[in-house]
């Protein structure tokens, strides 16, 4: 059928296809998942509380509800001073890693991109290794590992970005990824060298690299919170532009998108989130890949869906994973990076088998 | 309706002068076809007009220099249909066409009902409304090209740049897409600049043709003046016969004989 006809006559009477966005059902499901994970995380542990009692205890702190706390003073201390900060940190770290992974996948149009793609892991690893091996900060009683890991992660990505840029690679993602690989190799080489020269600290370095969610209380959570909030805000702000980037740099540019600036902002925000997560929890693998992919498979591929849902699902997922870590072989703990990878690798194999396309 | 004027436009890519002093003037509503052998600079000239590569000389869109228009401002005036569009296979046709609304949204703005309506109208104008819920990965070549054109239409720009819009289609698909462009142009007063490989189709649909070779304009005018055996033989190194018909000249390729080959220089 050719030729021009009035547009109005051709508009259908059938219900219009909807633009992508989070449906109420998915928003509620994600919210329920986070609440459930949080309650379980608070309730279970060496001292079991029961989810119902925890819920009552939490509600007793909400004014005007008239709910009495069912807890003794000791239980109260265990819940609020030990378990709650750990759960809160788990929520933050999981949300940051999952959203950073989703953002990296969007900005590099690569489903295999993870938050460590541009050298954040290697930089953080080197930073933490240097502090552990040379006892920096220890004599004065300051734990400099988080600071060093944070600085290392930001530094690693910064060097990769500068290298990619100097190769003219800000316009093409491949150059930037190769720069990230180069920086990762180099920093890993330095880290391995330092570690091999100081074998007496290998175990400490190794346990840091496998990740853990131990906190020294609410202070860590309060330090992490502003970084998490800032990066989440920037990433969510760019969620629709990440959809536009799906048609490639040149076409996105011809649609009026300042591609280089968007990429810089998204990479910066995702790196801030990754560095913060790494600083407080070491290297936790796979969360940044499996959570966004699970969301894509279940709820849709638009970043207007993937980013907000990854934030929520990542938060709940890491709290549940941490629950396994501290209960599976209690009183000992499994390193959380081992559990995420143990669950993540088979899941990822399923994702690869079921998704129709791999690659941009 | 946009008047496009280029003056001595030159583009240098990796030290090679790919476009070398091209001056064009497109009246509002005109369709000009860029023809020329591979590597003549057609695509690069289109990219320069779209503000995607730096250029020397001047490219003025309704009196505004392209290099000084902002990205978004330019995207509201110029829509590009690339030769090989990037097709995200899992995106729905509606989502894809709505991407054309991007220059009309704020930096982080979300498309609303009006943008979805504009996208549906664009699909309707291309007789492709039935594709609205399909995934891009499930479309045929012709359907895909309609989706890409619909995105450009939804952009609501008055200048349409088409880079080999029919290169992936069979002859029927080629005619359909070009008929759609012709009718859109009439309905929406579009100015069209298109690079085209098929010389017969180029002559049938464009008002004027500009023949590029080695980055320079070597001939221009109505199809009858540009599609001559002599010009095509010289610049394409092809052996052809040109037959005049009521829709314009038809270019027929011939099996080359020794004496018809391009002289070796």
Image: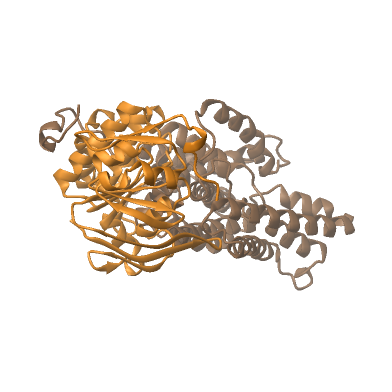
Chain colours: A brown, B orange
Where is residue A162 shown, x and y percent of the image?
61, 65
- Residue A116, image x, y percentages: 62, 51
The answer to whether one can see residue A44 in this image is no
Q: Quadrant of residue B206?
A: top left
Count of marks overlaid on the render? 0
Q: As rendered, which of A268 and A178 lies closer to the eye?
A: A178
Judge left or right: residue A49 versus residue B124. Answer: right
Left or right, residue A320 beside residue B245: right
The quadrant where residue A15 appears:
top left
Residue sitting nearer the eye, B182 or B142: B182
- Residue at image location 72% in from the left, 56% down from the top: A125
Observer-nearest residue: A289 or A92?
A289
Query: In the shown orientation, is residue B250 left or right of residue A207?
Result: left
Q: Residue furthest front?
A: B259
- Please name whichever residue, A162 or A114, is drawn nearer the observer in this view of the structure: A162
In the rendered view, tell whether residue B248 sits above or below residue A191.
Answer: above
Is residue B136 placed above or below B50 in the rendered structure?
A: above
Q: Position of residue B93 (x, y in %)?
A: 32, 35
Asked whether residue B27 is in view, the answer is yes
Q: Is residue A70 above or below residue A274?
A: above
Quadrant of the rendering where the N terminus of chain A is positioned: top left
Residue B35: x percent and y percent?
36, 47
Please say if B248 is above or below B24: above
**Residue B127, quarter of picture:** top left
| Residue drawn at 33 percent across, 28 percent down | B171
Q: Residue at x 75, y 49 (%)?
A: A207
Q: Name the residue rendered at 67%, 61% in the picture.
A: A149
């Amino acid at each position: 059928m050719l030729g021009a006809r009035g547009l109005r006559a051709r508009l259908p009477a059938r219900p219009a296809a909807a633009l992508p966005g989070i449906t109420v059902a998915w928003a509620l499901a994600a919210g329920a998942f986070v609440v459930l994970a949080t309650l379980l995380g608070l309730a279970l542990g060496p001292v079991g509380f029961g989810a119902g009692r925890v819920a009552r205890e939490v509600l007793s702190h909400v004014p005007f509800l008239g709910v009495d706390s069912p807890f003794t003073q000791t239980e109260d201390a265990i819940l609020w001073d030990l378990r709650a900060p750990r759960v809160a940190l788990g929520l933050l770290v999981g949300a940051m890693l999952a959203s950073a992974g989703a953002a990296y996948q969007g900005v590099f149009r690569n489903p295999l991109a993870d938050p460590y793609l541009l050298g954040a892991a290697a930089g953080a690893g080197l930073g933490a290794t240097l502090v552990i091996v040379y006892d920096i900060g220890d004599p004065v009683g300051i734990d400099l590992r988080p600071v060093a890991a944070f600085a290392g992660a930001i530094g690693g990505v910064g060097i990769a970005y500068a290298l990619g840029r100097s190769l003219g690679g800000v316009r093409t993602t491949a150059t930037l990824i190769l720069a990230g690989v180069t920086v990762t190799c180099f920093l890993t080489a330095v880290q391995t060298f330092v570690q091999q020269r100081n074998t007496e600290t290998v175990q400490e370095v190794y346990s840091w690299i496998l990740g853990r969610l131990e906190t020294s209380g609410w202070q860590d959570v309060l330090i992490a919170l502003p970084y998490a909030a800032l990066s989440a805000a920037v990433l969510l702000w760019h969620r629709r532009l990440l959809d536009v980037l799906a048609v490639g740099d040149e076409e996105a540019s011809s649609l009026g998108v300042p591609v280089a600036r968007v990429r810089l902002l998204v990479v910066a925000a995702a790196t801030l989130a990754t560095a913060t997560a790494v600083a407080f929890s070491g290297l936790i693998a796979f969360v940044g890949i499996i959570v966004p992919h699970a969301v894509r498979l279940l709820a849709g591929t638009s970043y207007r869906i993937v980013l907000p849902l990854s934030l929520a699902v990542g938060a709940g997922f890491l709290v549940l994973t941490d629950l396994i870590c501290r209960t599976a072989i209690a009183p000992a703990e499994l390193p959380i990076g081992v559990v995420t990878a143990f669950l993540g690798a088979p899941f990822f194999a399923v994702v690869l088998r079921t998704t129709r396309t791999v690659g941009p | 309706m946009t008047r496009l004027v280029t003056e001595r436009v030159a583009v240098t890519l990796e030290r090679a002068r790919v476009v070398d002093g091209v001056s064009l003037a497109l009246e509002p509503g005109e369709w000009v076809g860029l023809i020329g052998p591979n590597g003549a600079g057609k695509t690069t000239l289109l990219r320069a007009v779209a503000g995607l590569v730096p250029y020397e000389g001047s490219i003025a869109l309704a009196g505004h220099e392209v290099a000084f228009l902002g990205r978004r401002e330019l995207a509201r005036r110029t829509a590009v249909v690339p030769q090989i569009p990037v097709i995200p296979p899992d995106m729905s046709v509606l989502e894809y066409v709505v991407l054309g609304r991007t220059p009309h949204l704020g930096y982080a703005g979300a498309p609303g009902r009006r943008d979805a309506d504009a996208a549906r109208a664009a699909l309707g104008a291309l007789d492709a409304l039935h594709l609205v819920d399909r995934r891009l990965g499930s479309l045929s070549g012709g359907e895909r090209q309609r989706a890409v054109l619909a995105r450009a239409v939804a952009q609501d720009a008055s200048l349409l740049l088409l880079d080999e819009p029919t290169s992936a289609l069979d002859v029927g698909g080629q005619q359909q897409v070009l008929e759609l462009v012709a009718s859109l142009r009439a309905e929406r007063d579009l100015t069209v600049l298109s690079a085209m490989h098929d010389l017969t189709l180029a002559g049938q649909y464009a008002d004027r043709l500009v023949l590029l070779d080695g980055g320079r304009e070597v001939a221009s005018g109505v199809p009858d003046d540009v599609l001559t055996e002599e010009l095509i033989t010289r610049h394409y190194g092809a052996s052809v016969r040109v037959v005049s018909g009521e829709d314009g000249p038809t270019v027929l390729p011939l099996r080359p004989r020794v004496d018809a080959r391009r002289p070796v220089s």
